[in-house]
Amino acid sequence: MKTNFLSIALLGLGLTSSAQTTIPSSSVQIQTALLAAPVDKRDDASVYGYNEKGDFILLRKGKNEMICLADDPKIPGLNAACYHKDLEPFMKRGRDLKMAGKTPKEISDIRDAEAKAGKLRMPKQPTSLYVYTAKAENFDALAGTVKDGYLRYVIYIPYATPESTGLPLKPSSPGMPWIMDPGTHRAHIMISPPQKN
């Protein structure tokens, strides 16, 4: 995969805005971004992506609770994500801090301090994130075609722990849910189905 999931979890899908040679059309970006969303949520989800200059913009205003992010065209392969709107303050803060040049550790530390101070609003209920990826050789970004895509599931539960959830710190079998970053504002349940060989 083109990025590891930890960087996504820590940076809140931090995206950049510099342009590359070719940016897929808005319709293709929307089509591939929605691959990360549950099927019954796709038609009404909001979608963010890139304009011709490479600026990160709203491509489609939605009507439901889901926000989807198109693949960053500067990075090989496909990496699209959709999440519940209550995660947007956390995700947007991560994007803004990355744009300001902060490192992953700085982003994590700043958001942690802001969440503890009540400045960064985190969801009060379990909140979903879906990440859909594919290797570069399996993704035609301009046509929007994907082969052997992989979907992972994440449920954010800020400050949850193994003790509060009964979840392990790592999976003991393929696809087993486990808790990542326990006890922090970014605590989340990871569910990674077995991948094809």
Image (cartoon, rainbow, N blue to C red):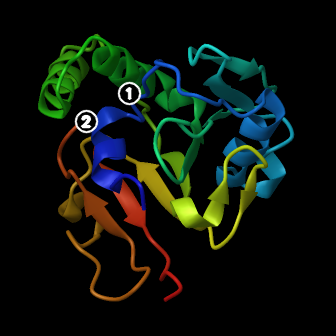
* Residue 94 seen by the camera: yes
Q: Residue at x 86, y 40 (%)?
A: 43
What residue is pinned by disc 1?
122
* Residue 121 seen by the camera: no
Tally the numbered discs. 2
120 to 24, vertically: above or below: above
SS at mark 1?
loop
Q: Position of residue 9 (x, y in %)?
A: 33, 44
SS at mark 2?
loop
Foreground residue among 191 and 123:
191
Q: Position of residue 70 (x, y in %)?
A: 62, 36
Q: Residue at x 38, y 62 (%)?
A: 190
Instruction: Tell me whether the residue at label 1 lies in contact with that at label 2, contact meaning CB atoms closer than 8 angstroms.
Output: yes
Q: Residue at x 19, y 14 (%)?
A: 117
Residue type at the position of mark 2? His
Furthest residue in direction right, as rendered: 43
What is the distance, in whole Å, between disc 1 and disc 2 at their CAs? Answer: 7 Å
Residue type at the position of mark 1? Met
Side of 129 relative to 119 (left or right): right
Q: Quadrant of residue 104?
A: top left
What residue is pinned by disc 2?
185
122 to 93, vertically: above or below: below
Q: Position of residue 11 (x, y in %)?
A: 31, 34
Side of 110 relative to 10 (left or right): left
